[in-house]
Structures are given as C-alpha cells and as structure tokens.
C-alpha cells in the first residue's frame, strides 16, 4: 500500500479521510482499514493528548441501559472489544460488575431492569435492606433499590485508544497527528486542507468531539450540541482498597436528579475511588484548560453530599480533580448520520458522556455509512433530522 509520511503530499486519492483521532474516529478508521480501504486519520494534536473526551485511564462498560437501542448494540460492542484485545494481546477491560441504584419507582431504573431481563444479562435485584449485606460499602436509602449487571466493568481507556490506533496502522492505515484540519471542500472528491498539507478522498468522516460544530460551520451545518467541561474527581478511601477492584467492589450508577452520579472502584490511583457527576459547566473546548470560577462548581458540592450520605468509607472531599469534555445533544442520543447536503460526508458527534463503550459499534456504523453500505443497526435514534430545524438567520 502506498503511504505518505506525515506532512508529505499524498498524490493519490484516499478512500476515506477521518478527522479526529479520539476513540470514535480511531475505531472508524480501524474498521475501514480492516476492510482494505485506504484510510487517513487526521488529528490536530500530537498524540496522546488530554484535551478532548477520550483520555484518562478508565471508562465504564455496561449492558444496563434504559434505552433498548444501546442495550442491543452493547452485545456486539463487548465482542468487538474482546476481539481487539485478543488481536493486540492485551486485555482492554476488567469485569467488576455494576450496580444501578435508584428509587424503585423511578421509570429509568425500571427500564434498566427491563432491558437486563430482556437481554438475559446476569445480575440480581437488591432492596435497600438486602444491598448492604452484599455490598457493605454502600448505604442506600429507604425506597431505593439496586440492580446489578455482572457483565459490566472498567475499560482501560488510554490503553484502548492506543491499541485501536496501533491496530489501524498495522492494517495499513495512515495516522497523521499534529495536523489541524483548517478547510474542507465538499464534492465527489472531498479536499481536506490541514496545517501541514492537502489531501483528497472519496468520502470524509468527521468525528471531532467537542470541535464538531467548528468543522461543520463552513459546511453550512450546526448541530444542537452543548460542550461541557467535566470535573473528574477521585476520592480517598478511609481504608485503602475497601472500595477497590481486589475487594470486588463494583462500578455504580446512581439515578439522581438532575443528573446521575457514578463511580468506579479504586484501581488507577491506589486508595482513590473515581466518583463523578454526569454533567459540568458549558465551555468552549479551546478554553477547557482555564480553571472555572469557584461559584461554577455545584457538581463538587453535590458529590460531597452524595459521598457522605451513601459511601461511609470514603472521605467526602475530592483528593484529585482532572478534566474532560462532554459534547451533549438535547436527548443525549448520539449523532450518526450523513451530512444532509453532502452525502459522502459522514458525521459522528454528540456522544453525550456515554460513547466510549460503544465506540467499536459506532466506528463500524460510521465506516458502513462512508462505504455506502446498509448500516447494521437502525439509525433512527441518531438522525440529524430528529432535531427541530434552527430558526432562519436574521436578515
Ligand atoms: C469524564 C468523562 C467520563 C466518561 N465516562 C464514560 C464512561 O464511563 N463510559 C462511556 O462509555 N463513556 C464515557 N465517557 C464518554 C466518552 O469518553 C466519549 O463519548 C468519547 O470519548 C467521545 O469520543 P470522540 O472521539 O467523539 O471525541 P474526542 O475524544 O474529543 O475526539 C475528537 C478528536 O478530534 C480532534 N479534532 C477536533 N477538531 C479537529 C481538527 N480541526 N483537525 C484535526 N483533529 C481535530 C480532537 O483533537 C480530538 O482528538 C466519558 C467522558 C468523560 C469526559
Ligand atoms: O457511560 C457510562 O457508563 C457512564 C455512566 C454514567 C454517566 C457517565 N458515563
């Protein structure tokens, strides 16, 4: 296969160019290269980097979803994660199980229970009385219940991202990092200009995370995406390891209003549990490194309150706070679709803080769209047309 080194002009035509080497773009490129398509993956920052949404050591993988479409896609996603780990000879996740905790009358909690039963996922239902017998570290409240998903666990996120990029290259793909895409000219052949060169391809996939709308603006498309700066908080165990993977403590997702709180057993930082709020403060991705004002931290206050009420063995003060970006759609469903005007431009965006575990299937679907194939799942929940048309621009 003919390949140009980074920065060298590539005279021939790529089958597909993928913009953005986060987990979604990297999986898309991997599937394309595995199918023998000549593929170029472009990334604005030198890799690895921590400015988007795919960095960090851990992400939850789970089958427990209130929406049937994700629960269904997860069956294949687990297989593809397994396959990638086997290809690379490195395990990419650790099974820890997950507890969904909520009021037993909460509709979202009930939908999670239903999908678990429907898909025959091994697990158990606990009442507020029976849960502490099994997991003494959690103190549920009256009227609450928990359901476990035994298949769930922790994905080793940084390792997974590096692995999928390595496998993409091993299949003949070209990855050029440190090259920002500055211009896209649509057409039967799409022309992509970066800070280092000009490339041409028969199709283009845009997986630019929180930068999606910046790339789409010159293509006359704006999606209703909100970019949020998320505090990733780690909390000290009073007895090191009590909430750890070796003590078989599970991940958890507490259905709280207005946003969920979730946690992962201590592992990446010994003695520290990762416990986060499923929302953050609106921020432009270019400004994400700027510390927020103290008044903009209601999430940490909510987390302190949760930790002191539910997790008696954890110190209710974050010991480490890192950052990451969410790109949310109004309904928190992804965007997986063609550009409405340019059918060879495919968009994967709006992963709304829950896209990592699904990246193997998302990448497959985006690769299918870019090859003009019938996608292997119904894409209705992910279409751009589900959003109301924006009001016409003022004259
Ligand atoms: C704190 C946190 C916790 C999360 N927890 C979970 C979880 O437990 N389970 C789960 O499944 N998911 C989770 N997620 C969500 C998941 O991590 C994201 O959905 C996923 O990483 C999104 O990947 P992406 O490829 O769309 O975006 P990104 O990783 O942001 O990738 C986009 C890439 O595009 C590049 N780019 C942008 N513009 C250009 C340009 N002009 N030229 C070239 N390159 C460009 C960017 O630099 C970036 O590398 C979490 C996310 C966060 C932030
Ligand atoms: O996707 C997930 O599994 C986690 C749990 C809850 C919210 C944040 N993301």
Image: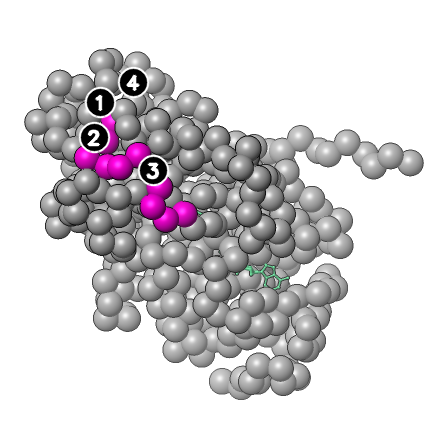
Residue 356 appears at what percent x and percent y? Answer: 40, 50
Q: Earlier in the sequence, mark 4 or mark 3?
A: 4
Q: Report the disc number at residue 103.
A: 4
Above-or-below relation of 216 to 110: below
Of the two numbered discs 2 and 1 on the same chain, state the one appearing first in sequence: 1
What is the number of the mark on residue 312? 2
Q: Tell me the crowding category of disc 1: few under 14, some 14 to 19, or many 20 or more residues within 10 angstroms, Cα based.
A: many
* Residue 348 covered by magenta stretch: no
Q: Main secondary structure of the magenta part?
A: strand
Q: Which colour scheme appears in the figure?
A: one colour
Residue lying at 56% horizontally and 85% vertically, measured from the top left:
5
Question: Which region of the structure is painted magenta?
Answer: 310-321
Instruction: Identify the mark nearer the N-term, 1 or 3.
Output: 1
Label for residue 140? 1
Q: Secondary structure at mark 3?
A: strand
Q: Are marks 3 and 2 in contact (CB under 8 Å)?
A: no
Mark 3 Cα shell of 10 Å, populated few (<14), some (14-19), many (≥20) = some
Q: Is residue 82 above or below residue 178?
A: above
Give the alpha-carbon distance from disc 4 to disc 1, as whole Å: 10 Å
Q: Position of residue 368 (x, y in %)?
A: 49, 57
Q: Residue at x 42, y 30 (%)?
A: 301
Q: Does the beta carbon at disc 1 come under 8 Å from ligand 2? A: no
Q: Which mark is residue 317?
A: 3
First of labels 4, 1 by sequence position: 4
Depth-wise, is mark 1 or mark 3 nearer the camera? 3
Q: Answer with the quarter of the image where residue 127 lies.
A: top left
Is residue 302 visible in the rendered image? The answer is yes
């Amino acid at each position: 296969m003919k390949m140009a080194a980074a920065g060298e002009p590539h005279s021939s035509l790529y089958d597909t160019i993928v913009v953005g080497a986060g987990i979604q773009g990297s999986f898309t490129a991997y599937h394309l290269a595995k199918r023998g398509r000549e593929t170029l993956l472009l990334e604005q920052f030198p890799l690895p980097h921590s400015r988007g949404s795919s960095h960090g050591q851990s992400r939850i993988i789970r089958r427990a979803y209130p929406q049937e479409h994700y629960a269904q896609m997860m069956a294949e996603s687990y297989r593809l994660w397994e396959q990638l780990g086997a290809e690379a000879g490195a395990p990419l996740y650790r099974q820890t199980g997950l507890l969904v905790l909520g009021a037993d009358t909460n509709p979202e909690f009930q939908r999670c229970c239903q999908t678990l039963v429907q898909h025959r996922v091994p697990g158990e239902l606990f009442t507020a009385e029976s849960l502490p017998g099994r997991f003494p570290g959690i103190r549920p409240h009256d009227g609450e219940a928990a359901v476990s998903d035994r298949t769930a666990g922790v994905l080793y996120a940084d390792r997974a991202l590096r692995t999928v990029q390595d496998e993409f290259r091993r299949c003949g793909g070209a990855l050029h990092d440190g090259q920002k895409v500055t211009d896209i000219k649509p057409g039967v052949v799409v022309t992509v200009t970066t800070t280092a060169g000009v490339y041409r391809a028969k199709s283009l996939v845009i997986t630019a995370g929180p930068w999606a709308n910046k790339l789409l603006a010159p293509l006359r498309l704006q999606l209703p995406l909100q970019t949020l700066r998320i505090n990733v908080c780690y909390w000290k165990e009073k007895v090191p390891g009590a909430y750890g993977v070796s003590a078989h403590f599970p991940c958890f997702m507490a259905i709280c209003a207005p946003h969920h709180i979730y946690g992962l057993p201590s592992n990446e930082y010994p003695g520290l549990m990762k416990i986060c709020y499923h929302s953050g403060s609106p921020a432009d991705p270019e400004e994400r490194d700027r510390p927020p004002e103290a008044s903009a931290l209601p999430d940490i206050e909510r987390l302190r309150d949760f930790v002191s009420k539910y997790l008696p063995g954890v110190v209710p003060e974050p010991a480490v706070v890192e950052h990451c970006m969410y790109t949310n759609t109004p309904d928190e469903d992804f965007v997986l679709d063609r550009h409405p005007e340019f059918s060879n431009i495919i968009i994967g965006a709006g992963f709304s803080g829950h896209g990592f575990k699904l990246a193997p299937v998302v990448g497959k679907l985006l690769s299918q769209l870019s090859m003009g194939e019938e996608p292997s799942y119904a894409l209705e929940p992910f279409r751009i047309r589900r959003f109301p048309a924006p009001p016409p621009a003022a004259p």
